[in-house]
Amino acid sequence: MKTITEITSKQQKAEIIRLAAYCRVSSNSEDQLHSFAAQVRYYTEYTQRNTGYQLVDIYADEGITGTSTEKRSEFNRMIRNCKKGLIDRIIVKSISRFARNTEELLTVLRLLSEFGVGVYFEEQGIDTAMMNSEMIVTFPGMAAQQESITISENMRWSCKKRMESGEFKICTPVYGFNIVNGQLEINEAEAVVVRQIFDLYLQGLGKQTITNILNEEETAKRNGRKKWYISTVDYILNNERYIGDTLLQKSYTTESLPFKKVKNRGEKPQYYVENNNPAIVSREIYQAVQELQKKRKSHTGQKKKVYPLSGILKCPECGRTFRRQIIRGKAYWLCSGQSSGATKCIKIRIQEDEIYASFQLMAMKLIENREYLLDSLIKQIEEVQYRTSGNQEIIKGLDKEIADLSTRNLLLARLHTKGILSASDYAAQSTDLSNKIKDLRIERRKKLSEDKDDELLDNLKILNKALKETETNYEFDSELFEQIVVSITPLNNSELIFKLLGGIELTEKISEKGQCKAV
């Protein structure tokens, strides 16, 4: 007779689930004053109530758009930690807090699934770890996306109307101004620097010289930054804000998801508003600077005609710049030392139009892969700076302080509503707490940004922004070229090395018709 014995496995100890919470507030409006801190506090208490969870971290993005994951640094840090195997489960209030773009939502969920990470959406009661089909999330995601599109359309319409009436108010003041009660007011400490820049230029100093002076004097910029760039000086000298006027809609947001901010090159109307804000410099000084800039450009043109490639092309052997030469009606570039007989470099001679074509081809490749290349590189550098700066624990402490003060402020509001606290006492105590919260928020933003003043990182961000605002176009873009190209080194008659801002070097081939055999 057969004997059957049941073998029972030993009871395994329940595994601890490593939980991460993600929270976000969609705006900085007054009615959401407590939202950010409240969410941080909620998820802290949530994990304390559920002993099966071990809280890894609370990833909190504050006051930024949800239409794209690109600008959410904490969200992207959370995804990177999932990839490292540090997180088992993510909890978030709703799908709209996680993503408002269906395509990005599904892409992220597929990626997290590959990492073995589930996401629980509290409002919808959806747990991706239990799903058989991503379609469960698609429908709420589509609704959230449509909500985002509707909100954006309403905001664009509202902005357009306010621009047309001259009532549009900016959210971030330019250097030299503060925003007080929705109005621009002069920041006297910064205004002194602005006037100094205008005065130095009218004294005959060049923009690079002015930049060097500001850096030597360690003149502070916003948020305690001290590094000045020639582009900043040029921006100040040509900004109509400093005479009290403003040009609206210099850039605009695209109308389809994912929304992108691009430079207005005539696609949208612009609005010039006179006497919009207090002036830092007089109109006479501003106009004198504009005339001097035109005069210097004209004077430079009389001495020597400057082309986009002037001073950019470098010989790979002697290091001298290339010069322009007309051969049979076509413009070519060759080593100035070799052409004059001063050096015996290899004979490289390349048609001008093909250099431009090679640049544009390289630029379009970079634009198409910008998110995978530049975004990833910038985030990696920021991550290293964040981890090595020692600010991580400080930021967590600031988050806790903000949450505690916001809770106290909320309690005061309830006491006032119930008549326990008088209006005068409530106003005094609430104002004091709100000021403390505001100071902590400023300190938090400062800690997040103070390690990003590295010149390499700044240049990478300038490069990234320039490419982001450029639409795909295979015709030579001289403005983009001047913005991002540092130098070009021809390896031979068929290959160019483009050195871009941020130290990036890319090689692009030249078509055979652009090559000129030495004669």
Image (spheres, rainbow, N blue to C red):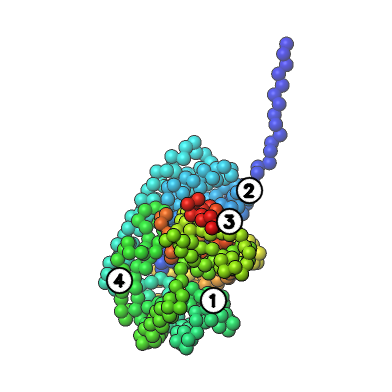
CA gap, disc 4 and disc 2: 51 Å
**Which of marks 3 and 2 precedes in the sequence?**
2
| Type of amino acid at the residue the image marks with label 4 | Tyr
Mark 1 or 2, closer to the camera: 1
**Which of marks 3 and 1 precedes in the sequence?**
1
| Type of amino acid at the residue the image marks with label 2 | Gly
Identify the disc placed on residue 492: 3
Q: Residue at x 51, y 54 (%)?
A: 515
CA gap, disc 1 and disc 3: 37 Å
Examine the rendered structure and indicate whether residue 308 appears above or below residue 23: below
Q: Determine the image quadrant of residue 469.
A: bottom left
Which quadrant of the figure contains the C terminus? bottom right
Identify the disc placed on residue 85: 2
Nearest to the observer: residue 133 or residue 224: 224
Q: Position of residue 65 (x, y in %)?
A: 44, 59
| Type of amino acid at the residue the image marks with label 3 | Asn
**Which of marks 2 and 1 precedes in the sequence?**
2
Q: Residues within 10 Å of mark 4 (few under 14, many from 20)?
A: some
**Which of marks 4 and 3 precedes in the sequence?**
4
**Which of marks 2 and 4 precedes in the sequence?**
2
Q: Which residue is mark 4?
A: 271
* Marks 2 and 3 close (CB-CB < 8 Å): no
Q: Position of residue 86 (x, y in %)?
A: 63, 50
* Marks 4 and 2 close (CB-CB < 8 Å): no
Identify the disc placed on residue 228: 1
